[in-house]
Image: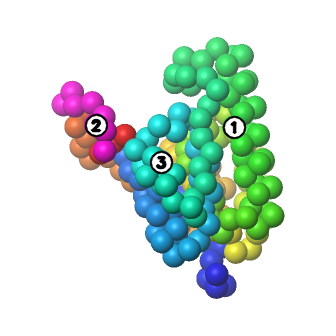
Amino acid sequence: MSEEYGLIHVYCGEGKGKTTAAMGLALRAAGSGIRVLVVQFLKDGNSSELKALRRLPEIEIVTGKPVKGFTFAMTPAERELVAAHHNACLQQAVARCHNGEFAMLILDEVIGAVDKGLVDKDLLLDFLRHKPARLEVVMTGRNPLPELVEMAQYVSEINKIKHPYEQGILARIGVEK
């Protein structure tokens, strides 16, 4: 990889497409022979794009949370379990990136996990301040910390203008999931 690599990306906003944009970047990187680690937070890892990306040898995916359901419905014990799991996943990803295993790290929904108190913001910020110089880092989610926006070279806000869910159309396989 050349010296141009090593930037930080943030895909944020209330609209749909943040994860899709990040996974498209993973696909582009893999097509160029770049090793990518995708770590998902707040999701179960069953989306169609992950099924396709798992077929590519350049991409490794770590996903899932130990508790099903939305964060607002979790008990304090469940929240603690999810936070411990998410922080452990982030720590393992950080270690593997510092070992040089990957040139791109995608932290899908890490911004939302930090916002909900399910990922240690200081752990994330410290990693970003001391990440390998040529590691490209991509983060997605709603409500990014001002520090993340400041650190990033790319910040793309995806806003919803209209969504089929508003007309009663549920998520469809191959399009939204």
Mark number, residue 55: none
User: Does residue 170 belong to the magenta stretch?
Assistant: yes
Q: Which residues are magenta?
A: 166-174
* Residue 69 percent location from the top left of the image: 52, 22
Q: Which residue is mark 2?
A: 172
Which residue is located at x 72 percent, y 33 percent? 85
Q: Residue at x 55, y 22 (%)?
A: 68
Picture quadrant where residue 128 is located: bottom right
Residue at 52% in and 70% down: 29
| Residue 78 vertical placement versus 123 (above, below) | above
Q: Considering only vertical position in the picture, is 169 above or below 137?
A: above
Tell me the element at label 2: loop
**Distance between mark 3 and mark 2 Cα atoms:** 15 Å
Alpha carbon of mark 2 to alpha carbon of mark 1: how far?
Answer: 27 Å
Please rate how many residues cluster around mark 2, counting C-alpha atoms within 10 Å: few if below 14, some from 14 to 19, many from 20.
few
Q: Secondary structure at mark 3?
A: helix
Residue at numbered disc 3: 50
Amino acid tagged 1: His
Of 145 and 5, which appears nearest the observer? 5
Q: Circle 3: is it few (<14), some (14-19), or many (20+) Cα within 10 Å? A: some
